[in-house]
Amino acid sequence: MLKISNLVKDYEVNSETIRVLDNIDLTVQDGEILGITGRSGSGKSTLLRIIRGVEPFQEGSVEVDGETVTPDSGKEGEKFLKRVTAIHLQRNFGLWNGPCIENVIRKLYYLEVGHEALPATDAPEYDDLYAEAMEYMKLVGLEQKALHSTNLLSGGEKQRVVMARQLAAKPRVLLLDEPVTMTGPDTKQEILDVIKSLKEKLDIAIIVVSHLPEIHAYLADRLIFLENGKIAADGEPTTVLKNFRKDMKPMEEPAALTSREACIRAKDISKRYSLIRMGEVLNIKDFSLDVNRGEILAFIGSSGAGKTTLIKLMEGLIKPKSGTVEYSCNGEWVDVINYSKKRIELRRIMSIMNQEFSMSPHSTVREQIRFRLSLKRRGAIEYARKKAQDIGMSDETLDNVYRLPDMPTEERDAFFREMNLPETIYSELFPYIPVTDVDTYAKPVFEALDLPTEVLDKTPYQISGGEHVRAFIALSLATSPEYLLLDEPFGDLDPVTLRDVTNSLKKINEVFGTTIVLVSHHMDFVREVAHRAVLIENGALVMDGEPAEVCQELINRSNAPYMEHNLEDLVEGK
């Protein structure tokens, strides 16, 4: 059993004390699933980190199975909480490369020896560790992918491997922070049912933090709603969820499409991923798709269907075995996959936001927008080409350097190491614009995104989750790109903030004429934001049409009972 009494948490920000949690009292029984929800920044994740023992608190106590931890318990209290809890953090993709099951074997070995080495396959304990690890893989429904390499898993599959690692610690309290954020309906259902089965099999206290109302309606025995650091409601989930209703803005209609002029053409794309010892895992064959100018198009499908691979192919971040992806750029068709001198011009009018997007934690939003503007303003490429010639850099290398800010952090860092580039390369090639120019750019974009301009001079730590996402969108919209590609960046937003971001995307699309291609597992979001949806299954296009119809087809195929708890019905109290 977990019991929290009079818990208080304060943060010091710029010499100001901000109370994040204010006298929290709650109890979670063994075998009970408690849901926690609320707006972004309401203190949900902070509460989980305190229970985990990685965040100090000022007042109150945390009790697990009769042992109490207070602010005076020091390191011993932290060690105790870390020993009896396990946590799955939102957007946690931190996995070792190699077969999935080895990640769980490493965790089991760590519990024995204190470090995550991988024992040799002929070590005396290896067979027992492998067998135990496979049981945890079964618990999260990944036994068939136990030998698949982690770097080729979908976002949802990575999250399940992370969960298997947490279960391997045999916790008394399981903490799940957005455990199904990046997964399709079928995988969501599987994970939710796994969590329900854990309740019965392990008889431990389980806390689930999620912004998705339908998850709590399906999963939670009880739900609390956090607001301004306090428990504003505690009770039956569908009743508590109505707290979202009071702050939700009306839904704005997307801009009408006036023409069907293609501006992106993917033709006969083929890509096959094979894994050591496991053969083929994903086979995209002869995939073709046109995207119309000014359109918001959404890729949907189950986890592992190939959506992220397809959008990376369309972004030119991975190369297909065969086929082409071309964009309309300055009146010409330019191939984004294969190098040409025109490709860098295309990259200037493209912007990409990946699943693992992040902003530098130590730089202000203004500084980060300034950097992006310095790269993508008019005239920047011409200057960089002259400078590259002076330092002996080829145009193809410059092209690769130019795309790095749009790549996921891990891939970007690996490329930097491989090319042995100095940290000063960007300031050499792309001199910073004046700081005041950021305000000129930011005003119309921040207005379209409903972001206060005060956010410009704050770091990501000083703004809410919703403001972080919208600030990154503002960063991605430097120089008003013609093309914006988004790979599931909004899955962990609460319904109120998601409505704000959805309305903002539609406004950006209308005001700037931006063509938007996105991947999402969130059916309500897709129905609300997109002009058109495409259903992907096993790397193939199986349906293309009106978002509501395509989303319903995925729901029908997914056999996901949790989807019966419709977001609009829950939030609007129907």
Image (cartoon, rainbow, N blue to C red):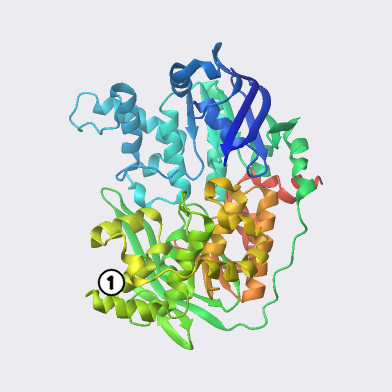
Residue 450 vs 394, above or below: the answer is above
Judging by the rendered image, the residue that carries numbered circle 1 is 397
Q: Which residue is farthest right?
A: 574
Q: How crowded is mark 1: few (under 14 residues within 10 Å), some or many (20 or more)?
A: few
| Quarter of the rendering occupied by the N terminus | top right
The residue that appears at 77% across and 42% down in the rendered structure is 242
Report the number of discs: 1
Residue 481 vs 196, above or below: the answer is below
Instruction: Quadrant for residue 104, please give it.
Output: top left
Front residue (pair 228, 351): 228
Instruction: Quadrant for residue 135, please give it.
Output: top left
94 relative position to 567: left or right: left
Q: Which residue is farthest top?
A: 66
364 relative position to 145: left or right: right
Location of residue 352 in the rendering, given as x and y in whole percent from the top left corner: 48, 65
Location of residue 217 in the rendering, given as x and y in whole percent from the top left corner: 69, 38
389 relative position to 478: left or right: left
Front residue (pair 101, 454): 454
Q: Which residue is farthest bottom?
A: 331
The residue that appears at 54% across and 28% down in the rendered structure is 50
> Secondary structure under badge 1?
helix
Residue 472 vs 231, above or below: the answer is below
Location of residue 365 in the rendering, given as x and y in whole percent from the top left corner: 53, 57
Q: Which residue is farthest left?
A: 122
Instruction: Quadrant for residue 283, please give it.
Output: bottom left
Q: Which amino acid does label 1 sit on?
A: Thr
Res 552 seen here: no
Res 388 seen here: yes
Location of residue 109 in the rendering, given as x and y in whole percent from the top left corner: 30, 27
Front residue (pair 141, 93): 93
The residue that appears at 33% across and 82% down in the rendered structure is 341
